[in-house]
Image: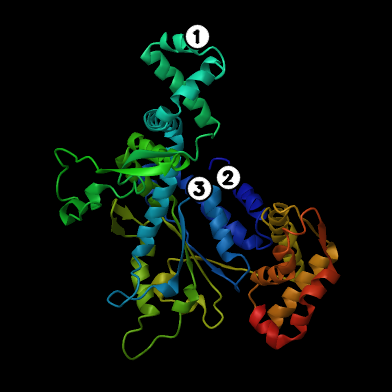
Amino acid sequence: MDNLTPQTIVRELDKYIIGQEEAKKAIAIALRNRERRRQLPKELRDEVMPKNIILIGPTGVGKTELSRRMATLSKSPFIKVEATRFTEVGYVGRDVEFIVHDLVDTSLSQVYEKKLLEVEGKAEKVATEKIISYLYHQVMPRKRRLAAKRQKGIAVASNKQQAQALASSESPSAKAGMDKRYLARLLNNHKLDEELIEIEVSVDAETPFMDYRFGFYGYDGGEFLGIAGDREKEEEPPVRRRKVKVREAKRILFRQEANKLIDFDDLHEEALKQAENNGVVFIDELDKLAAPSIEVGRDISGEGVQRDLLPIVEGTSVLTRYGPMKTDHILFIGAGTFYRSKPSDLIPELQGRFPLRVELKSLTRNDMERILTEPNNSLCKQYEALLATEGLELTFAPDGIKEITRLAELMNEQMENIGARRLHTIMEKVLEDANFNATDKSGEKVTVDAGYVSDHIGDLIKNQDLGRYIL
């Protein structure tokens, strides 16, 4: 984060998102302010609140991608939610507090992966030793004689008496060590990946986050709320035996040994801290909540949800299964088209919690040409790489790209304007034959020029009724 100046952040975002300089600038400042806040004295640090943002613009112009890339760049816990999936408390539907629970789960996954890297070497070593032990006791008995002869360089057809004398001269411990070294070499060379072995696995090896003190083996409300004290003696998680291939055993035993080396109390605490101070929540379709108020009855789809969101956005404490979490310093980014409504239609209290509003511009044909070619993850680069795995060399001619963007612009004008997402549907249709026949055309070269695009999609554009369903 120290090196992520606002200018650096914008340059990194430029690698994936075309245009929208004003939105990039606002997001870069919001991200940098987090680092500045971190350096303040504690008494002032707690007073500095994030400046939440509303991104206004048509679909497909980069609102979600801007937020996601920002979170990835700063390694922040990030979730995207649709405002319309929530309903007012007391009605059937998802409670807004699930936003916080989902954010904590995302943070926990990030911290867990970081902890795995820290213990990777030790866990891998212990897991390998266990697999070699399983192989030695389960697989080696039927292969020990052949393995010993190979290890000593004794040919099967050579002097058998001399071979037996040499073998019998070795102590049992020396022979075991020799066999295990031989198995270790085969294991490292992936020669035993398909062998079946029976291993012992703790039942929570695959779900390390669900600490049994918080209800994995039976929900205890007192313990969940932190009322009861720690158990005097923690129970060992139950163990079961599984017969799996060595390849799968490596993964299972590595996770199991890594979990033994990780302090999960510390992990939970760090995950909550990361979510509280670095969390980013992207609330899409915020404009759908800003519909005109209903005078009769309760509006469970709009104003009621806004009022439930308000405490989360302005700062409250939510009880998660890993402990209480404060939402005061989460960065909230709202987004919506605001075609039929405007941000001022939101309830005043919620408006005040989104002080920054940025309007994203509609994409021009030139923007879409750049989207197809310039970003590190551009569609052209993706399709070229995908078909290269089949041995098919795919290239896009400049006139082909211009034709694709011309058709995308035309379809957006004639139908619903879905921005850059229209490029996905047109590209998929243009390359349908190439994708389908790639295996049979291995070694060939396909050039997507204007003629190729017209041959594969021209009729659909002319037939608007058919194009409506396909593109």
Question: Quick one: 206 or 471, which is closer to the camera?
Answer: 206
Question: Quick one: 197 or 328, which is closer to the camera?
Answer: 197
Q: Amino acid at mark 1?
A: Gln
Looking at the image, can residue 300 be seen? yes
Q: Is residue 289 left or right of residue 15?
A: left
Q: Position of residue 258 (x, y in %)?
A: 38, 36
Residues at marks 1 and 3, CA–CA distance in whole angstroms: 64 Å
Q: Amino acid at mark 3?
A: Lys
Q: Amino acid at mark 2?
A: Leu
Q: Position of residue 155 (x, y in %)?
A: 57, 18
Task: Identify the residue position indicated by label 1 in the image.
Answer: 162
Residues at marks 2 and 3, CA–CA distance in whole angstroms: 12 Å
Task: Identify the residue position indicated by label 2 in the image.
Answer: 4
Looking at the image, can residue 329 be seen? no
| Residue 75, label in figure | 3
Q: Residue at x 37, y 69 (%)?
A: 309
Residues at marks 1 and 2, CA–CA distance in whole angstroms: 71 Å
Q: Examine the rendered structure and indicate whether residue 128 appears above or below residue 456.
A: above
Q: Position of residue 418 (x, y in %)?
A: 63, 75
Q: Quadrant of the C terminus?
A: bottom right
| Residue 29, label in figure | none
Q: Position of residue 388 (x, y in %)?
A: 73, 53
